Amino acid sequence: MDLIKSTATAPYIFVKSSISTYAELIERLRYHYSSMIPFPKSWVSLCIFLMVSPLLFHLLFPLWISLLSVPCFISWTLYLAFAQHQNPNRVKILHIAIPTIPLSPIRIFQVNRAFFNYLSKNIYGPPMVIFKTFIWSTWNKKNKQVMSKGRIAKNINFGSKFKDTTLDVYESTFENRDHVSYLHSKENHRPVIIFIHGGGWNSGHKNLYSPIGYNLTQRGFVTVIPNYTLWPKATISEMVADIDAAIKWTLRNIRKYGGDASNITLVGHAAGAHLCMTSVLNYAKRACESHSDHSSAIEKYAQSHVHKLMGVVLLNGIYDIPQHLNFEKIRGIEELSCMSRLFENKLESFKYWSPTEILKRSARFIEKGDFQQFIPHNIMLVHAKHDDVVPFESSKLLYDSLSKMKLENLSLVAYNGTDHYQYLYDLFLAREEFFEHLDRFYRNCRNIKRYKRWLTVEGLRNPKFVPITFAEFVEGSRTHSSQTSSDSDLLR
């Protein structure tokens, strides 16, 4: 009888023991992790929690899958689109290159962070895709109207190795000379700007920058906007050669379009700023190396094309390639960017095409004073203080290197509260901030003999003009005493 009784009560004892053990485990977990896990406070709520948990898991499972799959989908799509061509990390099986995609959760997170950061930055300005589509459609119609009046010359071959690489010239339409802020020559020729677009060396087209050409002509400039051949079609040396060819063409032909060949400013943004500075410094270095005799160097200097540039204005540029590659690695986008592949994944190539490294290699010519004879002495660097695409240190490093040459008009303008694209939007949308700094730059330029100050009285120059508070200078502007002139001298 006792055996039967004990056998009958065995399941009850087992269940009671199991519940007791489970309850003890729950109490321990609740004691140690009560601040992190919302455990039920009573047995009734515990039972409800255990009954509802499978249902919650079933409902939330698709969400969990989405949280895992969507970031993977975004990062893998970006890699398949941008990281395959000439990627040394691609593995070949039976002579077939297998696409490379990120599998590391850290890399997937970094790529997604960069992607959504790019989207958020472009929401503050015009969303880039929509904005460029609008420009492509709307401004091309406007260009045709202006072209019919002979104000825009399109698709001019300027001597590029690639015949489909051309430039556009926007003639000045600002007829009222009393309101023009920049000097016109005695022959009534207008100052000239050559604008080199950015785009990471692998994107961009002159047609997208039509508003810049139009806005600059409204302010009295003749504007030249060239294409340069992009990666992977062209190498970095061919891109720089395109910039050289565009400068040469402008010097030889711009008078036909009403431009002053002695008053040409080279303006570049991001990768375009890198190409501008590389073109200028590489020419100076080659000239110094080719002419050790000072007199012959001066003779060659008189025949050069780069030295005839009045000035250079650089916006958010990349001037130290190894440093920028490290920055891209920190962001986790070095494989998405074409930069390392453009420079052949070699440290020697990174340094050779870095403006800061060119200046280091030219130290002996700088000490002699020869190097300074081959570059423009009017240089303005503009950079967003908190740029998260190209760090501000890039421009600061170049500014420090150029300062050693004691150029007459060298300045660094740093903005707070702006990003990598803001100056481009300023040019697109004709905002006054950038043009104020351009005006200040021209006032300090050595070879402008006369100057009419930009009129800022409301309604006098532009009926819709409203005075704007300009961005704070957080880095000083350096102008040597030999360059300083009073307003009365400039207006003479």
Image (cartoon, rainbow, N blue to C red):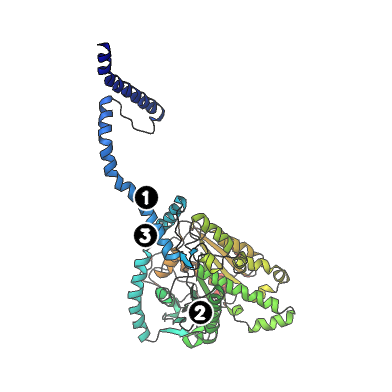
Q: Real-space Cα distance between discs 1 and 2? A: 56 Å
| Left or right side of 231 for 49 | left
Q: Which mark is residue 191?
A: 2
Q: Amino acid at mark 1?
A: Leu
Q: Which mark is residue 425?
A: none
Q: Real-space Cα distance between discs 3 and 2? A: 35 Å
Q: Where is residue 322 shown, x and y percent of the image? A: 58, 61
Q: Real-space Cα distance between discs 3 and 1? A: 26 Å
Q: Are marks 1 and 2 in contact (CB under 8 Å)?
A: no
Q: Which mark is residue 68?
A: 1
In the rendered view, tell whether residue 424 sits above or below residue 54. Answer: below
Q: Nearer the viewer, residue 277 or 88?
A: 88
Q: Is the residue marked by circle 1 packed among few (<14), some (14-19), or many (20+) residues within 10 Å?
A: few
Q: Amino acid at mark 2?
A: Pro
Quadrant for the N terminus in the image = top left
Looking at the image, which residue sits at the far bottom?
Answer: 256
Q: Are marks 3 and 2 in contact (CB under 8 Å)?
A: no
Q: Is the residue marked by circle 2 packed among few (<14), some (14-19), or many (20+) residues within 10 Å?
A: many
Q: Are marks 3 and 1 in contact (CB under 8 Å)?
A: no
Q: Nearer the viewer, residue 80 or 122?
A: 80
- Residue bearing the label numbered 3: 123
Q: Where is residue 482 shown, x and y percent of the image? A: 65, 70
Q: Nearer the viewer, residue 147 or 8?
A: 8
Q: Nearer the viewer, residue 282 or 322?
A: 322
Q: Amino acid at mark 3?
A: Ile
Q: How many marks?
A: 3
Circle 2 SS class: strand
